[in-house]
Image: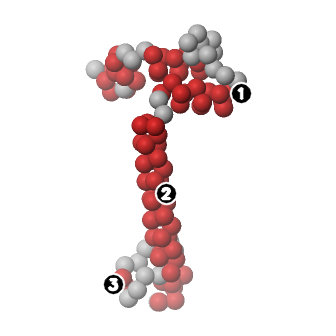
Amino acid sequence: MKQIASICAPQFRQTQATWGAYHPATILEDVINTLTFIAKYCEYGLKVARCFIINDARFHTQRLRILLGREPDLIHPVTLNEKMCHRLIYDRNPHYTQLADKLAVRD
């Protein structure tokens, strides 16, 4: 019975009460999950810190420069991407936030 359970261990997480100790595959899975969580948490922290370091106009200009391969004109936008970024930066209408919310639009 214990041999069959060891074959199925990667598929079914066993508790310490059943095994007496964690299975090596389960320990490796827990370590990978923990490292993934730490990496995503650090990435989120860097994105939040970026808001205090760089302003919106510069961020969107850099992003569009990479996307378009040229310097975007956010003052007089021509392409759809430039127009959307222009609206994000210069047109702060709270009505747009309500329109983006699916549940709020239905009410």
| Rendered image: mark on residue 69 | 1
Q: Which residue is mark 2?
A: 39
Q: Residues within 10 Å of mark 3 (few under 14, many from 20)?
A: few
For the residues marked 2 and 3, what is the alpha-carbon distance in whole angstroms? 31 Å
For the residues marked 1 and 2, what is the alpha-carbon distance in whole angstroms? 30 Å
Q: Is residue 38 left or right of residue 63?
A: left
Residue in the image at 38% along x and 88% along y: 20
Residue in the image at 53% along x and 21% along y: 85
Q: Residue 101 or 97: which is nearer the viewer?
A: 97
Tell which residue pokes out farthest to the front in this image: 53
For the residues marked 3 and 1, what is the alpha-carbon distance in whole angstroms? 59 Å
Helix, strand or loop at label 1? It is loop
Q: Is residue 47 left or right of residue 73?
A: left
Amino acid carrying mark 2 in the image: Ala
Q: Residue 87 or 58: which is nearer the viewer?
A: 58
Q: From this view, report whether residue 18 is shown above or below residue 52.
A: below
| Mark 3 vs 1, N-terminal side | 3
Q: Position of residue 28 (x, y in %)?
A: 51, 74
Amino acid carrying mark 1 in the image: Gly
| Rendered image: mark on residue 17 | 3
